[in-house]
Amino acid sequence: MFKSFFTILAAFALQLTFAPFASFADNHKASAKIKVLLIDGQNNHDWKRCSPVMMETLKATGRFTIEVATVSKAEVAGFNPDFKKYDVVLSNYNGASWTKDTEKSFVQYIKGGGNLVVVHAADNSFPKWKEFNEMIGLGGWGGRNEKDGPYVYWKDGKIVRDDSKGRGGSHGRPWEYKVIVRKKDHPITRGLPTEFLQVKEELYDRMRGPAKNMEVLATAFAKGGSERHEPVLMTITYGKGRIFHTVMGHSHTSMGGVAFQETLIRGTEWAATGKVTFPPITAAELPVERAVYRDVKDIKPLK
Ligand code: ZN
């Protein structure tokens, strides 16, 4: 009697001791940190103030660890990181061409299943690097025109590829633009309201590029610009690599928009893993009636 009571007590104690540990271990396993390499150091935008917002946004979720490679023009010749150490590369870089060796190792990394997130002016970079332009789908400026690929936009319920001549890359005046989800069943967009407002910033339009293996997840109407529904969120596959491309994120201020933050978080996780484990964002959190800013301190960690 005593023995069996003791056994039950011991088992109960054991459960008390180990249950929390087991559940911690499960959670930890489910949310192993994603290793991000953020590349910056040259940009026609204020990368010194933008990169910290992106890092803090991702870190606040508890899902990511981030290392930064800041590459000045003088440092490009010696820049050749071991990309394979990272689950995903986050580019905030719009600057001088990398060396041929670095380009080659980056192409090998992405082809072999490495992943990439391209934010705003990072898609202005490397206009002459063929493989990079295939990775990003669309780009702007840097002499891009019809030789680089079609314009891509949404018209009459579908994506149009337009080969007409003209410059690649433009934007109207900054404003609060409405993002409309066009592909609702993608892991990135599945948890987003179907329409929401980004805070005031310029909206890229008339981008051009190879646009191969590319899906446009969301568009925004470029009022005062191209007057077309322009791609805002895109995914591209290149070899085994996944690429998430967002044209949002002009400044550290507009990176304070919930629209930018949530799409960056979801897009980076998707690029790194092919899945999104973050809970859905409600229309109250990301409304279409007004543009909402959020302090990174108010980002809830992933449970
Ligand atoms: Zn900009």
Image (tube, helix red, strand yellow):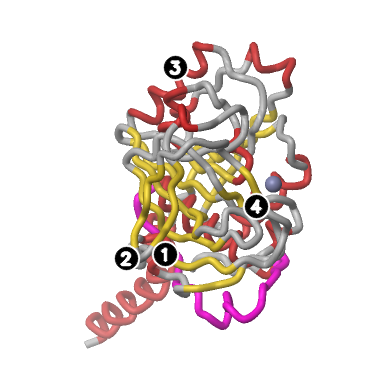
Q: Position of residue 29 (x, y in %)?
A: 38, 55
Residue position marked by numbered label 1 in the rendering: 189
Magenta region = 273-297
Position of residue 118 relative to residue 226, above or below, is above
Q: State the count of labels.
A: 4
Mark found first going from the N terminus, 3 or 1: 3
N-term-proximal mark, 3 vs 4: 3
Instruction: Assess disc 2: are there few (<14), some (14-19) or many (≥20) residues with their C-alpha within 10 Å of its C-alpha.
Output: few
Discs 1, 4 touching: Cβ within 8 Å: no
Q: Residue at x 45, y 19 (%)?
A: 105
Which amino acid, by three-letter code, is at mark 4? Answer: Gly
Disc 4 is placed on an element classified as loop
Q: Is the C-beta of the residue carrying label 3 under 8 Å from the nearest atom of ligand 1? A: no
Q: Residue at x 62, y 62 (%)?
A: 223
Badge 4 crowding class, 10 Å Cα cut-off, few under 14, some 14 to 19, many 20 or more, is many
Q: How packed is label 1: few (under 14 Cα within 10 Å), some, or many (20 or more)?
A: many
Q: Could you tell me how far apart the alpha carbons at marks 1 and 2 are, in whole angstroms?
A: 7 Å
Label 2 sits on residue: 185
The reply to whether discs 3 and 2 touch (Cβ–Cβ < 8 Å) is no
Which amino acid type is marked by label 1? Thr
Distance from the alpha carbon under mark 3 to that under mark 1: 32 Å
User: Which residue is denoted by mark 3 in the rendering?
Assistant: 104
Q: Give the x, y percent position of residue 92.
A: 63, 39
Query: Looking at this view, is 268 or 6 the one in front?
Result: 268
Quadrant location, the N terminus: bottom left
249 on left or right of 190: right
What residue would you read off at disc 4?
A: 249
Tell me if residue 255 is in the magenta stretch: no
